Image (cartoon, rainbow, N blue to C red):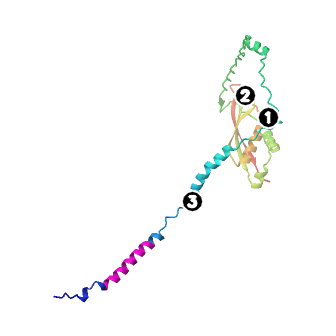
Amino acid sequence: MEVKKNPEVDGERVRLPLSMLGFLIIGSLILASFSYRTPVEDKSARQNKKQDLDLPMETETKQEEEPPPPPEDTPPPPPAQEPVLDEELEVKENEDKDPPPPIDPAPVKLVQEEEPEPPQPPIVDFPDVEAGFPGGPAAMKQFLIDNTKYPEISRQMGDQGKVYVKFVVERDGSISGIEIIKSVSKELDREAKRVVRSMPKWSPGEKNGEPVRSVCRIPINFTLN
């Protein structure tokens, strides 16, 4: 019985395409193997390696260089001189030093305490005889007219009026404790105190026939003409 081949399963027809496919795969692998390259080294890494390789060579070259010979004309250094000790200084140092003379303490000055002033006698408000200006009230008025100076600033400001002054007449007739009891302005008050301070000594007040300290009050009139 003769065996018949099925034309659909005939291997001769597919042999050639499979062979061509195999050759194509093999050729691709061969081409890929030839085209493969190793990765490119970093340029900076290669430079560092090159410097590392060059350093020992430079060091060896520097070590091999011979130092220049010393100049022939240089004179030899002078010999070291031994220090000479001064015998006199040694003798003086070994001598016993005399102790310094004793210092006399400064004399202590005794400060005598000042004796406190005796307390002043009290002021008598109502003496038997009142203190008075020498020559009486008329002489005092004339003294004030002649010696009072109107302050220029008060004249420009138009200040005027009576300044009442209180003061103490001491037992010797001198004046102390000047106060302003009624003010007009700072300048007029200052002038009133100045005039009273420049007065001559008054006649002191009396109590039981003896001079006493007493208080006086007077007005000083400032009027613009």
Question: In which image quadrant can residue 190 be found?
Answer: top right
Task: Tell me how many marks there are.
Answer: 3
Residues 107 and 44: in front is 44
Per the rendered image, the range of residues in magenta is: 13-31
Instruction: Find the residue positioned furthest to the front.
Output: 1
- From this viewpoint, is residue 86 visible? yes
Q: CA distance from mark 1 to mark 2?
A: 14 Å
For label 2, the residue is 171
Numbered disc 1: secondary structure:
loop
For label 1, the residue is 200
Q: CA distance from mark 2 to mark 3?
A: 117 Å
Q: Which three-letter amino acid code belongs to the residue tagged 3?
A: Ser
Asked if residue 28 is among those painted magenta in the image, a careful observer would answer yes
Sequence-wise, the earlier of marks 3 and 1 is: 3
**Where is residue 165 drawn, in percent x and y?**
70, 41
Vertical side of 120 occupied by 55: above or below: below
Numbered disc 3: secondary structure:
helix
Sequence-wise, the earlier of marks 2 and 3 is: 3
Vertical side of 121 occupied by 48: above or below: below
